[in-house]
Amino acid sequence: MPLIHTATLITVASLLPFYLFLRPIGEIAVPDEQSLAPYYVVQEGDTLWDISLRFGVLAEDLQSLNEISDPNLLNQGTQLLIPGLNGVSGRVATVNVPVGESLQSFSRQFHLPTEQLAQINQLVSPGQLFAGRSLVVPVESVDNQLLERTRLAAGQSHLELAVKLRTNPWRLIQSNSLPGSWGALPGEMLVLPEGKRFFVDPIVQTIKTINLEPLNPIQGKTTSILVSAPPDLVLRGSLAGYEFNFFPYQDGYVALQGIHAMTLPGLFLLRMEIESPSGEKHAISQPVLVRSGNYPFDPPLLVDAATMDPNVTIPEDELWASLALPVSPEKKWQGLFESPVPVYLKDCWTSLFGSRRSYNGSPYNFYHGGLDFCGTSGTPLYASADGEVVFTDFLIVRGGVTVLDHGWGVFTAYAHQSEILVQVGDQVEVGQIIGLGGDTGRSTGPHLHWEVWVGGVPVDPVDWLNNIFP
């Protein structure tokens, strides 16, 4: 098994206006098996758009080259010629770059020169090999890859490593296509000679997986960092300026972290540090692509000017952000979060999370940090999960508010209430009435503004209603 890998896959099928269905192979150009042109064999669930994204080509070019008359119809097992691939021939496939990999480690794992991998994938800088990227490789390289790997420790020679592996040092050099015993530096990933089934790095030998879910985080969404490893390690990490908080979970550790809705899409450095009980450390640093949440622009809003005064909004925003910074070690919620409003209103939303906003003619440099539910003054409001009341008050912008701490850096907030029915320090249960809906604060009518904060960042509450975290 790989030293570090992820089972997370990128899927874009949900973005497609069409899907590819079965049709006779005879209607599509099929290259000869011995053809030198690179080709891909269509798998179940593939779409033309999905294939084009993975190989970095235009769907129109794929359709034209392969003489596909209807892109909605494609047969599993069909062979598609892939345009624009240099340095490779025959059948090709794509693999997602997991956390912790480099061009050099892929080169050794797939037995391909780094120059060839770079040429096939048009890589001109290390930063292009970010976690989650699709990497094109010959199928025989995927089928024949050596999965067992280790690292050359600091101060360790190839001979010492070979002795620990009980193998000939020249087999180790040959397996990694090294020019000689000087060809690798401490910390570099090395594939083990065939037949060797154990790791020798005292720090990372027990780490099974590091999973980032989703592998390409999205603005305003919750990201899970899952590490499968023994319980005696110390883990640290960060992404997009936020430090992870790891907690024991199943066979390892988990951290939940929100990505701010106003974070500019692009590459951010994921940093991980793993420390053994003896103090030995292993570090991982790799670019990760943060994708756009594609949030819409709301119509301009007219609100009370007093709720837009910076002398009011700045200190209130600072107070609000500080409430979600503490990290309680006990996870109090179970399963899905429940609707904070009565069942008949649970799907009645007047404004979604993340939408860009303009107030009183301002630029669109504001965003909606929660989910607005329909309601009236007096609508009962419920705790969406077990938690502790950590804040209640009537604020100028947010009106009557209650904040619940659910543990592990996860909070929910309930704003614009007409009445607050709990006090700081109360332990509440899911479904318990904690307040009544209202029209207080910066509001254009009675409703509940409901927020979910993860790792000090507001995230899309709908995800917590529909998905179980972690």
Image (spheres, grey):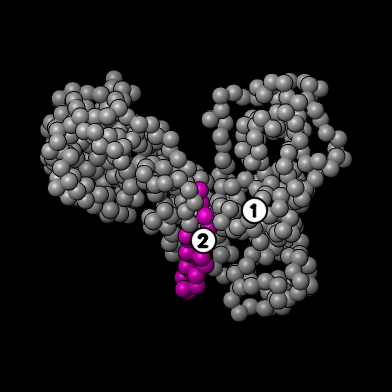
Task: Residue type at mark 2: give it.
Answer: Ser
Q: Is residue 262 visible?
A: yes
Residue 188 percent coordinates (x, y): 62, 67
* Residue carrying label 1: 123
In the rendered image, residue 192, in percent from the top left (x then y), is placed at 71, 64
Where is residue 205, by image quadrant? bottom right
- The residue type indicated by label 1 comes to Leu
Is 448 situated left or right of 291 in this image? left
User: Which stretch is magenta?
Assistant: 270-289
* Of the image marks 1 and 2, the number of the one nearer the N terminus: 1
**Left or right: where does residue 138 sit relative to residue 291?**
right
Of tags 1 and 2, which is closer to the observer?
A: 1
Q: Which residue is mark 2?
A: 285
Q: Residue at x 37, y 42 (%)?
A: 261
Q: Residue at x 47, y 43 (%)?
A: 291
SS at badge 2: strand
Mark 2 crowd level (few <14, some 14–19, many ≥20, 10 Å Cα): some
SS class of the residue under badge 1? loop
**Residue 245 location, x and y as percent?**
38, 56
The N terminus is located in which quarter?
bottom right
Looking at the image, which is closer to me, 375 or 159? Answer: 375
| Mark pair 1, 2: CA separation | 18 Å
Q: Is residue 448 left or right of residue 111?
A: left
